[in-house]
Image (spheres, coloured by chain):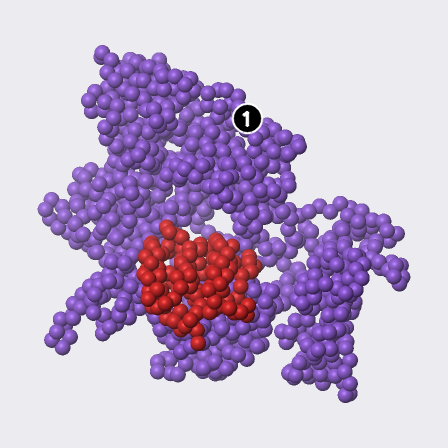
């Protein structure tokens, strides 16, 4: 593993909480590594497990799903469904020979800019340690 | 125009500029220290040097002083330039090794150490301060003095200056922090305190008041602005690339003709300095709760770090003192919100600092009376917040540590004290300072507490017709109550002005939509500089060039501000000129700017959904400020992802559903009737359904109120109004059999005496009420000398025997509070029982002053103005004794009478009271029928069986399901005036729907592909809105299964899409392929 390795991370952020939290990190000028590519979705529960697996098997080094904290979901309890689905995703990762640490589900509220930056830093670090994905061509 | 070749690229530039100005226009950033846009270039630091080729030779020149002339060939990044610049940086670093600005530039250029001998000075004679003071301020308070190696910056004769205006510009602009205002000026600089941050930090003269300010624009404080005071400076005007600074703006007086006024001037917090014994204003580590709120905030003075003011260290122990400026001799009312905000602040402080932070709350009664509050209070205790019941304490500072000692009389009347690093005063709510002026101006009356006067049955009206009131202006109150009252006031205005409603609205018209069906995508990309917000980090021209290379992109350009009015015109022109059928804007966040751009493309005839944004500011340039190259690469990626999605965008139509302009109100109690009358007054038909024979609900059993008014008379009046109102269709003894449909189009079936009736309506208001708890404890039902408060009230009513015949009232009466409330089974507070007990106690004392009354309580929760009646009861010798929840009172038979034993918490001993009558303050329990109604309407109940609103604080009368609203006891326990307010609020919210002819529904909702769906129904249950149903249909003679989406119920969360194993259902605008295209683009794969 060389020092040069910069992982590429796909992050699905829900429109109401986490995407807003990521915006707030910007408004507050909180710095985090430029490895994350955020894709806005209306709710974290919109993210099909296949999207996660496809991203990882097509060369993403990590996938981060961010949703509202339990109880804060704009769609009542979409985030709780995401949580259940995440368990399934972890099992699928194993089947595909992918490390569990390449996937993460986090709750970030619209007022948690610092938390988003923190999660981005931590997850980038975590994925960096794993080295490039074996699916990376 | 002149032509310059910069780093090999030839471009046109305006004449009369310096080289640096031209270079900056291209997006190339050169390091500078002595350059300032508003000042004459000076060429002191020489960091901006470039290599200029002219007449076959090259020279190194500082670009800030070099005039740009035609045909110059300039290079900013040759080896020679870089090498020379590095040497200069080393020299600067040697001269001022402590300057952060120089250190930063050194770091950016990979210089860790200087090879020159360090001189440890703090000034490298850049002259910014001198130029600023002379050129912009016209003062010359500082200047260069001496010559050669002795040259330095100083006021004349090394003394503080008489002429200095103490503006601080010199200190502000100094790159080495050398200039100290106190060394320059004879006058003492007075900091401008940041109002929004409660004066805990300073703010500049030109400032944005707070991050969420509306409009979110900067303002200039004319009291301090040098330009406005002395016609000097004016630097901000030159800096503002949007040219938004206008010094000529003046206050304007605007005259408006209005039919009604709603007064909501809010409140002011109590000035804690008045309570000298609490040390506020003397001891820095005593702060108000509002100051502490700012300290806790991420956008606050310490960026969310909990620090105490004296030494900016993190406290280990925080003490909260309650009732500061509430419940005292001068202010005999409770501020209603402080118990909960202190609890919240304590919990958040622990979250920020860590579990080990000690938070103690010194209080008299814990007033957690609203929905969900008692559970929150319990949670705080579980999290380790300590509640100390005591008389109002005093504080003193320990001078060595600046810690604060709180001294108090504990629950057992013994003196005690505890030491804290920080003390927070829970200051109360007061009427605004301008209250008397408001009262005079509007001709409205104030009450004894100097708040606006209202009457019990007209809680949103002032004494003057047409002037309505809301918020803490009428009584201290929490957010949900404030929101309800505001909606209630607007309902009243809507009735008053129903004939002119909507007459000032101008509908917006768009050109006919272009048909893009079957067209190859032609994408236009607009990349925003956002002034320097993006362009200062990201190489915008490079991103534009990159965008041009992407498939289907036929046009790309950069804009200084893509959101400016002139750029909207440019976008529209370019759509026409290049026949664009998709538009991508790479700028800030779609959360704030998508609506603007969608409107723009719609104005150009494009479907608004053929638009996509790339967030290269909030999620790129602002978060990768130190990594411009990587940020530029990421911006290209984000643009590529947006273009990939744009390619797959489809025109979407917002669906419009006609609205049936009538309402169903469930429940003919006080709330239901009030809501029905409000709606009828606004001109809408109402179907009012009541399960019992008589209207009135619980109000039928209320005979008098604490704050005056005659409930039975009022009830009679209201029932009469209901019965004669042609707009109200009344169904009594009716049962709701079914409700189907959704916002705008509901269909309800009711049965009455075996006959079934059906009607359609556009909205629903739930006002099903609640019941008094039937006690199982304290011998209730076994001994007729044990009764509930409502039963007592009946005996005390005007027509009763007790009120008319002397000496009928028993000699010794004991009231027991919290019967069926705040226990394991029902952990909530029933809110009204304390005031009910006080009301009945006062009534008894009025009729029979000699009766001995004992009220056994846990906390007396007479919030708001009810407090003064509690005071009155104590003055009239009603004895209040506190019992602990673990040692409840015991009631036993004693001959003909009763015996009550209670463990008194002040005396710490059991006390026996002989009682002739025991009155139980029974709580309020939810109606059993709620469950059925909740199922019909697909709305939730909380675990106690009350209806659960969309948001406890911000949407107190709405459900998450559109078109369904809530009021009265069905929501939670509340007093009659509060029920009126909520009923009016529910009506007001309902009319936001009813006053429209049709409702536009979001276009981004689920859509089924019948061919892909095999009817597995996995998606049916997860749908939070029950919008999906399994259906069967015939195809080629075979029965097939698929699902059907109720388009009015679906909100487009996409849970169904992620559940579907067959790609049979998707959310429009967020299709799997569209999201997948973004993923692929990010990974640069197909």
Left or right position of B97 against B292: right
Q: Residue at x 78, y 85 (%)?
A: B57
In the image, farthest residue toward the bottom: B56
- Residue B842: where, in percent of width, then height? 36, 22
Q: Closest to the observer: B1 or B525?
A: B525
Residue B674 in sight in this render: no
Give the labeled residue for mark 1.
B417
Indicate whether B797 appears above or below A43.
above
Q: Label the purple chain with its letter.
A: B
Where residue B81 sits, quadrant-wise, is bottom right
- Residue B356: where, in percent of width, then height? 50, 39
Q: Residue at x 16, y 67 (%)?
A: B1032
* Quadrant (top left/top right/bottom left/bottom right) for the C terminus of chain B: bottom left
Q: Secondary structure at mark 1?
A: strand
Indicate whether B12 appears above or below B801.
below
Q: Closest to the observer: B231 or B625?
A: B625
Where residue B220 sits, quadrant-wise, is bottom right
- Residue B390: where, in percent of width, then height? 48, 26
Left or right position of B705 against B47: left
* Quadrant (top left/top right/bottom left/bottom right) for the N terminus of chain B: bottom right
Dot 1: chain letter: B
Q: Mark 1, residues whose alpha carbon is within 10 Å: few (<14), some, or many (≥20)?
A: few
Q: Closest to the observer: B605 or B28?
A: B28
- Residue B315: where, in percent of width, then height? 57, 39
In the image, farthest residue toward the left: B754
Q: Residue at x 62, y 43 (%)?
A: B312
């Amino acid at each position: 593993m060389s020092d040069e390795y910069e992982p590429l991370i796909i992050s699905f952020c829900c429109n109401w909480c986490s995407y807003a939290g990521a915006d707030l990190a910007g408004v507050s000028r909180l710095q985090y590594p430029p490895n994350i590519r955020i894709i806005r979705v209306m709710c974290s529960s919109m993210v099909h497990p296949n999207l996660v697996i496809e991203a990882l098997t097509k060369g993403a080094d990590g996938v981060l799903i961010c949703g509202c904290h339990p109880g804060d979901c704009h769609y009542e309890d979409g985030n709780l469904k995401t949580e259940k689905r995440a368990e399934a995703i972890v099992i699928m990762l194993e089947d595909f020979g992918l490390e569990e640490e390449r996937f993460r589900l986090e709750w970030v509220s619209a007022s948690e800019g610092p938390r988003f930056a923190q999660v981005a830093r931590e997850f980038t670090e975590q994925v960096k340690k794993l080295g490039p994905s074996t699916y990376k061509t | 125009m002149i032509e310059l070749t910069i780093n090999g690229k030839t471009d046109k530039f305006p004449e009369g500029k310096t080289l640096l100005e031209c270079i900056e226009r291209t997006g190339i950033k050169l390091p500078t220290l002595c350059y300032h846009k508003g000042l004459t270039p000076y060429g002191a630091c020489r960091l901006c040097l470039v290599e200029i080729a002219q007449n076959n030779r090259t020279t190194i020149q500082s670009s800030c002083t070099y005039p740009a002339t035609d045909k110059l060939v300039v290079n900013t990044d040759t080896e020679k330039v870089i090498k020379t610049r590095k040497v200069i940086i080393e020299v600067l670093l040697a001269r001022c090794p402590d300057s952060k600005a120089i250190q930063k530039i050194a770091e950016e250029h990979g210089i860790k150490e200087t090879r020159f001998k360090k001189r440890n000075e703090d000034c490298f004679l850049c002259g910014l301060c001198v130029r600023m003071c002379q050129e912009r301020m016209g003062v010359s308070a500082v200047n260069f003095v001496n010559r050669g190696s002795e040259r330095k910056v100083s006021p004349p004769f090394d003394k503080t200056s008489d002429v200095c205006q103490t503006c601080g510009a010199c200190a502000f602009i100094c790159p080495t922090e050398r200039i100290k205002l106190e060394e320059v000026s004879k006058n003492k600089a007075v900091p401008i305190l940041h109002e929004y941050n409660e004066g805990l930090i300073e703010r500049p003269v030109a400032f944005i008041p707070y991050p969420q300010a509306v409009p979110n624009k900067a303002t200039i404080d004319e009291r301090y602005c040098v330009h406005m005071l002395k016609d000097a400076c004016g630097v901000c005007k030159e800096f503002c690339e949007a040219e938004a600074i206008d010094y000529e703006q003046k206050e304007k007086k605007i005259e408006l003709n209005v039919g009604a006024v709603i007064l909501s001037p809010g409140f002011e917090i109590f000035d804690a300095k008045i309570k000298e014994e609490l040390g506020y204003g003397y001891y820095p580590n005593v702060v108000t709760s509002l100051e502490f709120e700012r300290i806790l905030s991420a956008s606050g003075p310490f960026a969310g770090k909990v620090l105490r003011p004296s030494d900016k260290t993190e406290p280990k122990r925080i003490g909260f003192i309650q009732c500061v400026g509430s419940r005292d001799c001068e202010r005999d009312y409770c501020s209603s919100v402080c118990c909960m905000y202190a609890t919240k602040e304590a919990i958040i402080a622990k979250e920020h600092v860590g579990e080990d932070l000690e938070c103690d709350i010194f209080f008299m009664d814990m007033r957690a009376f609203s929905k969900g509050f008692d559970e929150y209070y319990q949670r705080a205790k579980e999290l380790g917040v300590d509640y100390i019941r005591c008389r109002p304490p005093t504080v003193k500072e320990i001078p060595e540590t600046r810690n604060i000692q709180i001294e108090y009389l504990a629950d057992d009347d013994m003196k005690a004290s505890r030491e804290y690093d920080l003390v927070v005063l829970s200051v109360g709510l007061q009427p605004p300072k301008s209250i008397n002026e408001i009262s005079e101006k509007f001709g409205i009356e104030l009450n004894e507490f100097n708040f606006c006067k209202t009457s019990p049955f007209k809680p949103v009206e002032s004494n003057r017709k047409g002037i309505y009131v809301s918020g803490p202006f009428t009584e201290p109150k929490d957010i949900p109550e404030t929101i309800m009252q505001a909606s209630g006031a607007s309902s009243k205005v809507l009735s008053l002005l129903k004939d002119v409603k909507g007459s000032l609205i101008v509908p917006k018209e768009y050109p006919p939509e272009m048909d893009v069906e079957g067209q190859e995508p032609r994408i236009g990309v607009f990349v925003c500089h956002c002034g320097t917000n993006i362009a200062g980090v990201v190489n915008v021209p490079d991103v534009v060039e990159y965008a041009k290379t992407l498939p289907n992109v036929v046009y790309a350009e950069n804009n200084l501000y893509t959101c400016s009015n002139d750029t909207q015109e440019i976008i529209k022109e370019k759509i026409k000129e290049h026949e664009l059928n998709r538009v991508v804007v790479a700028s800030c966040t779609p959360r704030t700017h998508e609506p603007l751009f969608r409107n723009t493309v719609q104005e150009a005839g494009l479907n608004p959904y053929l638009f996509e944004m790339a967030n290269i500011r909030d999620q790129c340039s602002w978060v990768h400020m130190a990594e411009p190259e990587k940020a530029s690469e990421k911006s290209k990626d984000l643009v590529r992802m947006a273009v990939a999605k744009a390619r797959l965008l489809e025109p979407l139509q917002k669906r419009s559903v006609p609205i049936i302009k009538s309402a169903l109100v469930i429940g003919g109690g006080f709330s239901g009737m009030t809501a029905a009358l409000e709606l009828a007054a606004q001109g809408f038909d109402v179907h009012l359904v009541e399960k019992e024979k008589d209207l009135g609900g619980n109000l039928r059993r209320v005979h008098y109120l604490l704050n005056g008014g005659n409930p039975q008379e009022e009830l009679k009046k209201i029932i009469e109004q209901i019965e004669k109102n042609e707009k109200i269709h009344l169904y009594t003894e009716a049962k709701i059999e079914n409700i189907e449909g959704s916002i705008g189009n509901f269909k309800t079936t009711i049965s009455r005496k075996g006959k079934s009736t059906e009607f359609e309506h556009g909205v629903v208001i739930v006002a099903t009420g609640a019941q008094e708890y039937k006690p199982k404890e304290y011998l209730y039902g076994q001994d007729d000398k044990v009764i509930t408060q409502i039963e007592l009230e009946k005996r005390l009513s005007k027509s009763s025997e007790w009120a008319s015949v002397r000496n009928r009232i028993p000699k010794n009466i004991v009231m027991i509070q919290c019967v069926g409330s705040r226990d394991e089974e029902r952990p909530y507070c029933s809110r009204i029982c304390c005031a009910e007990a006080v009301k009945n106690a006062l009534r008894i004392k009025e009729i029979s002053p000699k009766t001995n009354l004992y009220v056994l309580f846990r906390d007396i929760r007479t919030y708001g103005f009810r407090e003064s009646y509690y005071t009155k009861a104590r003055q009239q010798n009603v004895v209040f004794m506190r019992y602990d929840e673990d040692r409840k009172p015991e009631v036993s038979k004693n001959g003909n009478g009763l015996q009550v034993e209670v463990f008194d918490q002040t005396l710490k001993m059991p006390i026996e009271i002989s009682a002739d009558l025991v009155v139980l303050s029974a709580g309020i329990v939810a109606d059993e029928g709620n469950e059925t109604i909740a199922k019909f309407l697909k709305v939730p109940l909380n675990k106690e069986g009350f209806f659960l609103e969309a948001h406890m604080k911000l949407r107190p009368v709405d459900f998450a399901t559109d078109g369904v609203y809530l009021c009265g006891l069905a929501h939670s326990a509340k007093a009659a005036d509060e029920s009126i307010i909520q009923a009016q609020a529910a009506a007001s919210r309902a009319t936001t729907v009813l006053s429209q002819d049709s409702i536009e529904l979001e276009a981004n909702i689920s859509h089924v592909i019948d061919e892909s769906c095999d009817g597995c129904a996995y998606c049916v249950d997860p749908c939070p809105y029950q919008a999906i149903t399994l259906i069967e249909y015939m195809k080629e003679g075979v029965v097939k299964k698929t699902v059907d989406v109720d388009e009015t119920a679906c909100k487009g969360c996409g849970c169904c899409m992620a559940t579907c194993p067959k790609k049979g259902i998707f959310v429009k605008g967020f299709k799997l392929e569209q999201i997948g295209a973004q993923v692929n683009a990010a990974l640069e794969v197909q």
